[in-house]
Image: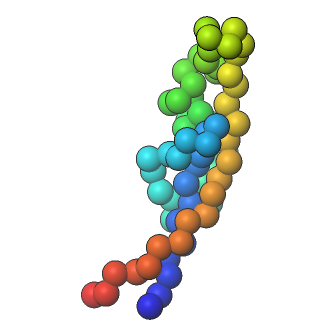
Amino acid sequence: MAIEAFFTIEINGLKGRKLFDTYPTEDEIEKAIRDMFPQGYIYDQFADEYIYPIAQVKKIYKLKEKE
């Protein structure tokens, strides 16, 4: 069985919805951050602190489907 490799952007441990065939560009990573953190941060009222985004690109392997 053959294996396919994909990339996904995780922000603060939350997986992105989009899979990329190649390593995402800096603009694509920044767009993903702006989609999840429109103001650049989230205020956590219970902890009384601001949460700032931390982005990571992860490589995912999937088995190719038989044709």
State the residue in front, 57 or 21: 57
Q: Is residue 28 above or below residue 44?
A: below
State the residue in front, 14 or 22: 14
Q: Please, which residue is most extreme toward the front here? A: 46
Determine the image quadrant of residue 54: top right
Residue at x-position 50% and y-position 82%: 3
The answer to whether residue 43 is seen in the rendering is: no
Q: Position of residue 4 (x, y in %)?
A: 49, 76
Q: Please, which residue is most extreme toward the bottom here? A: 1
Q: Is residue 54 above or below residue 57?
A: above
Residue at x-position 47% and y-position 87%: 2
Q: Please, which residue is most extreme toward the left here? A: 67
Q: Position of residue 16 (x, y in %)?
A: 50, 45
User: How many numbered badges does the structure rendering display?
Assistant: 0
Q: Is residue 1 left or right of residue 59?
A: left
Determine the image quadrant of residue 67: bottom left
Q: On the rendered image, what quadrant is the N terminus found in? A: bottom left
The answer to whether residue 16 is seen in the rendering is: yes
Residue at x-position 47% and y-position 73%: 62
Q: Position of residue 59 (x, y in %)?
A: 61, 63
